[in-house]
Image: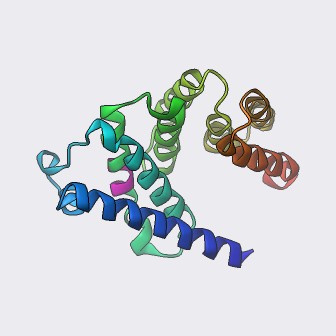
Amino acid sequence: PIEQRDRAARLYRRAQRHAFNTFELQTPGFAKALASDKPTDWPKLRADQIGLAYWAAAAWGGLIALSKDDPNTVADLPLAIRLARLAWQTAPEHGAGALASLMGSFEVARPGGSRPQALVYFDQAIMQGAGKNAGAFVAKAEGLALPAGDRAGFEALLKQALLAYEAQPNMQNGVMRERALWLLETADDLF
């Protein structure tokens, strides 16, 4: 429903805004540096900023995904990817595969993205999470198997996400479990 999409977009926008306010407090001029055309101007993330960068980039990506009809928001995709890459360059293992999974999702979303590189990211996310990161399986299913029309692979990955939740029933995996169940239920409509 449209109301839920709009609410989710508002929450993503608010999360991204809060993250950038924090970056600006920690590193004045952060947003301007991130938006620079010169890589030498891009901010250098400290180890203690990686989590914030991950969540900011993830929220930004979620906002962009829900705002396909808003060209100004969609135009920020390269900046969201840049922020995720800066985090990746500093701590590629962050979040037991969460950052690698985000990198894979951005790789398939960006114009000219590389499916083989996305596969590397997703497989790294699954390895880093020791099979207990449901989000990595869901992201790989949606990012690679679904666009390829690989229903068997899609369903197998989603079933692995359900097993990941059973192995580690935390909130993040719980959210991904619900998404996996919904995707399995709607697979006939997707393929």
Q: Nearer the viewer, residue 149 or 42?
A: 42
Return the x and y of residue 93 as percentages of the image width and height.
Answer: 44, 27
User: Residue at left 42%, top 55%?
Assistant: 56
Judged by its main secondary structure, the magenta piece is: helix
Return the x and y of residue 46 as percentages of the image width and height.
Answer: 25, 39
Return the x and y of residue 10 as percentages of the image width and height.
Answer: 54, 73
Q: Which image quadrant is residue 151 in?
A: top right
Location of the N terminus (image quadrant): bottom right
Display colour scheme: rainbow
Q: Nearer the viewer, residue 6 or 143?
A: 6
Q: Taking 183 as reference, is 57 left or right? A: left
> In the displayed structure, would residue 138 be above or below residue 36?
above
Q: Does residue 32 show up magenta in the picture?
A: no
Q: Which image quadrant is residue 176 in?
A: top right
User: Residue at left 62%, top 41%?
Assistant: 139
State the residue lying farthest toward the bottom: 3
> In the displayed structure, would residue 160 be above or below residue 177?
above
**From where the camera sits, is residue 191 visible?**
no
Return the x and y of residue 166 as percentages of the image width and height.
Answer: 79, 31
Q: Which residues are magenta?
A: 78-82
**From where the camera sits, is residue 20 visible?**
yes
> In the displayed structure, would residue 25 be above or below residue 163?
below
User: Residue at left 69%, top 72%?
Assistant: 4
